[in-house]
Image (tube, coloured by chain):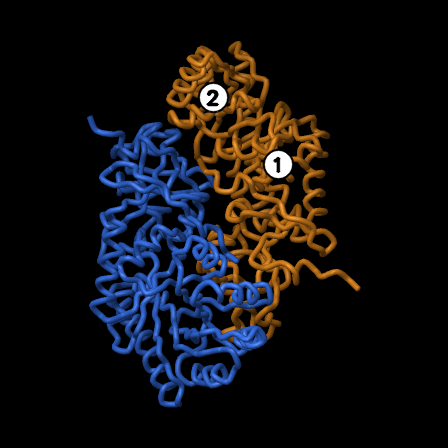
Chain colours: A blue, B orange
Amino acid sequence: MNALSYRDQLDTPCLVVDLDLLRRNIEEMSTYARSRGLALRPHLKTHKTAEIAALQQQAGAVGFTCAKLGEVEALADTGVLDDVLVAYQIVGAPKIGRLLSLLDRVRLTVAVDSIAVAEPLSQAVATAGRQLDVVIEIDTGLGRAGVAPGEPALRLAREVVQMPGLRLRGLMTHEGHAGRAATREEMEEIARRAGEAMVTTANLLRRSGIPIEVVSVGSTPAAFATTQVEGITEMRPGTYVFYDAAAFRFGRIGPDRVALRVLTTVISRPAPNRAIIDAGSKTLTTDPPPPGRNGFGYLIDYPDATIVRLNEEHGIVEFPPGSPVPAVGDRLEIIPNHVCPVVNLQDELFVVQHGQFLTTWRVVARGKVR
Amino acid sequence: MNALSYRDQLDTPCLVVDLDLLRRNIEEMSTYARSRGLALRPHLKTHKTAEIAALQQQAGAVGFTCAKLGEVEALADTGVLDDVLVAYQIVGAPKIGRLLSLLDRVRLTVAVDSIAVAEPLSQAVATAGRQLDVVIEIDTGLGRAGVAPGEPALRLAREVVQMPGLRLRGLMTHEGHAGRAATREEMEEIARRAGEAMVTTANLLRRSGIPIEVVSVGSTPAAFATTQVEGITEMRPGTYVFYDAAAFRFGRIGPDRVALRVLTTVISRPAPNRAIIDAGSKTLTTDPPPPGRNGFGYLIDYPDATIVRLNEEHGIVEFPPGSPVPAVGDRLEIIPNHVCPVVNLQDELFVVQHGQFLTTWRVVARGKVR
């Protein structure tokens, strides 16, 4: 007799992680980084989970990336962190105080993109008689934070290297705009230009006498493209541990490689071609579908159906006329459009293997936005 | 000397609740319900907080509404709940087991919209020798769960009253589609039609010998419209405790009535008319703006600025040419597009009064989607 399938055993809605797919995704990225001689520093924002960080470490990650200090604190408490890049501007006295406390616990590097950010850090660190490693964040086209490549980066670097307490280690960028490209070729071209801007800027700084040890790039969609540029030293992908519906569009992977799914139950069948599921925006988020797809997630069992609307605790699913429609009580699995904010809504992940429920992992850094 | 303003004291991003505005919103709805002789049964999904539920109770709420059993369990643990409508279809053995346990702790009523949902409930409750109060959920136009008004509702009611263990108390609907109307007049017309469908159906059932005690309607945008229909007995608004940017559009209230704001810090000023804030989609959610507005929230201090894009931990804000732009380190307050999922991302609310920080309240039912 077979043991109960996790699909019948687990209450819904919940997040199911397939351990074998997770391990395969982690191993593939580690193998790639090794083959290119790159340091792999995965972003923890995707999973926020100590057990997955440990798997990444075992596969060869040199350290981790976080956005917020709260993520660093929560994961440092589990003992899994020893070397972290905070790929974020640390602003304001409360956060600078927390940063100083963390210096006793982990090896920390933080991003700076202006004198207004770097100056208060320098003052606080120097006053405390400490030293802080920093990287300059470069905007290679995303249009978010970061200083422009080339001369503007050089001007900021010249200031930063004069600031007491700060040690400039290198440059970082997040080339997330590559993931918004229309085609794979366009994505690769954007990623290549971002990588070249980073290496060109690093060399400009070196020629000006500023040693640049780290040239770090991020983003899962562009992970295998940006890092083709010679001179990149480090990669920081996040989503690759799970992948999501956004990951299908450049054709490298399909639904069979996605390690995290939302398990949901049909709770109402109010019309012949409509089913209501118990996963709404408080589970799937309203993050929009990637270009070329519709709806708020990819239904593995019914790929032609569309999650047309979400309320907070309801998903409204429409099925093509004449196609099979699940009944009240049936279980469905959904690949989220964007997995990171979906994980951030849950206290735990349900780990499965060969169709059986194994264990739960706590999302220890969930909600750590400060 | 003045005490430190909460804007300078609190770390960001965080949710700030103005106690006086909160009390005013609660009092206004309670006064309205009393004036119309309506039972007020607020939906807890908006705040998920015991302290706010207690304020609603003190102002005359007869009980509460929840969507998920996890919300009921978390708030029952605080002792604030005694009478709850679960406005949701309870499907599957794990949830029915939890429902039975809750019968010992609170007075419970649950929604049913089909025989497929009602039948397993009846079997479980009758087997346990218990009785469960139910209401039939009617779809008055939202296109979500619910049986159609009139004859379909009567057919389901005839079945439900035969089912052992179930006691049919009445009818409920959520006329959330009224909130999507283009104008206030259209909203009021949709709400009126929804209210009339409910009362007509209730009377149809009564004429068929089925006693209908409760005729319950929901939705904050339509709260003062649906309940103008004679024969409605109960209202279940949720968002009214805080309001949000979606609440401005019908003109009844403006930003000065909104009791919850996201406090955020400018962390980068990469271009003359662009500021980057530390609130991204993991704080504001990607819920879209209401018709007629742009961006991912309303900036109280800069109403002409637009939050044009969100990444997980970054908000990208654009300012009109020539207008003032805040500096790195400045604090801004944002009214969310849709407040309920924003609260669901946080562990605590920061309560303020007269510009001073008072206390924190725990969002005890945060993330309780099961």
Q: Position of residue B291 (x, y in %)?
A: 52, 51
Q: Residue furthest right?
A: B1
Relative to B2, B216 lies left or right: left
Q: Position of residue B303 (x, y in %)?
A: 61, 61
Q: Position of residue B286 (x, y in %)?
A: 46, 53
Estimate how packed mark 1 is, as few (under 14), some (14 to 19) or many (20 or more) residues with alpha carbons within 10 Å: many
Gap in angstroms between the C-alphas marked 1 and 2: 32 Å
A183 shown above or below A233? above
A337 shown above or below A7? below
Badge 2 sits on which subunit?
B
Rendered image: mark on residue B100: 2
In this rendered view, identify the residue nearer to me: B11 or A226: B11
* Residue B149 in sight from this viewpoint: no
Q: Nearer the viewer, mark 1 or mark 2?
A: 2
Q: Amino acid at mark 1?
A: Ala
Tag 1 and tag 2 share a subunit: yes
* Residue A171 in sight from this viewpoint: yes
Lower position in the chain sequence, tag 1 or tag 2: 2
- In which quadrant of the rendered image does the C terminus of chain B lie? top left
Relative to A228, A367 lies left or right: right
Residue highlighted by disc 1: B223
Badge 1 sits on which subunit?
B
Residue ID at (43%, 48%): A285
> Which SS class for mark 1?
helix
A110 shown above or below B201? below
Q: Position of residue A205 (x, y in %)?
A: 38, 85
